Image (cartoon, grey):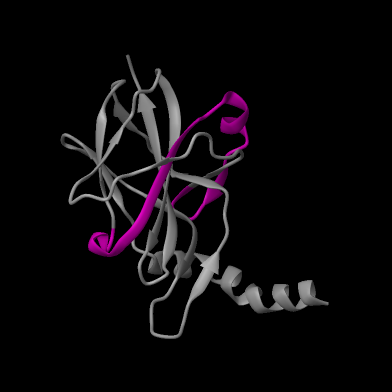
Amino acid sequence: MTRVLLILLTFPIFASAESIFDKVPVSTIEKGKLKQESVIGSFCWHPKEGNHFCADTGLVSPKEEIEIKPNSILTLKMPNQENLKVVQYSFVPVTTEMQTAKEEYPGGYNWQGGLSEIKELKLKRKLKIKTRLEPGLYVLSVSAWWKNYDDANHGFLIKVTP
């Protein structure tokens, strides 16, 4: 009985998922002059006092990758950065199987697969992520929690070249 009620209550969210995803601010990563905006994955967001909406997704990324060298340092810019509570990230190597299983998603791709080693970022004025990756294609998944109880997963697509 509870499951049926839950499905009925969440149906309006998925009926207009694209507009709801647009309400969650994106983050960016930068490497020199290269810049990429995130695609929003799972989140719970509170746009107004007393209101909130949530969505659960898989591993997401933009369609176009940003190309970097191994052992690069990426600068991460988050919305409302001064009120962050926790930021974690994971680089997920994209396999051939995952590439053929990728699906269209608002603003990018939803990949089949899960997170690998999760690391926590130290909260500083400038958020830096060290890549230390072998050449290949990766989804960078960044999860953030804010002091006001907002949370969101931000996905990026990274191509590491020799």
* Residue 137 percent across, percent down from the top left: 44, 27
* Residue 9 percent across, percent down from the top left: 66, 79
Magenta region: which residues? 79-108
Query: Which residue is drawn at the image coordinates 37% and 27% (left, top)?
Result: 159
Query: Which residue is drawn at the image coordinates 35% and 68% (left, top)?
Result: 147
Within the magenta stretch, is there residue 148? no
Left or right, 35 with respect to 114, comes to left
Q: Is residue 64 above or below residue 144?
A: above
Figure label count: 0
Camera-side residue: 51 or 162?
Answer: 51
Q: Quadrant of the N terminus?
A: bottom right
Q: Quadrant of residue 89?
A: top left
Query: Which residue is drawn at the image coordinates 31% and 20% (left, top)?
Result: 70
Q: Quadrant of residue 26?
A: bottom left
Q: Quadrant of the C terminus?
A: top left
Left or right, 36 with respect to 5, comes to left
Query: Which residue is drawn at the image coordinates 63% and 28% (left, top)?
Result: 97
* Residue 83 percent across, percent down from the top left: 28, 65
Left or right, 158 with respect to 93, comes to left
Q: Residue furthest right?
A: 1
Q: Is residue 158 above or below residue 153?
A: above
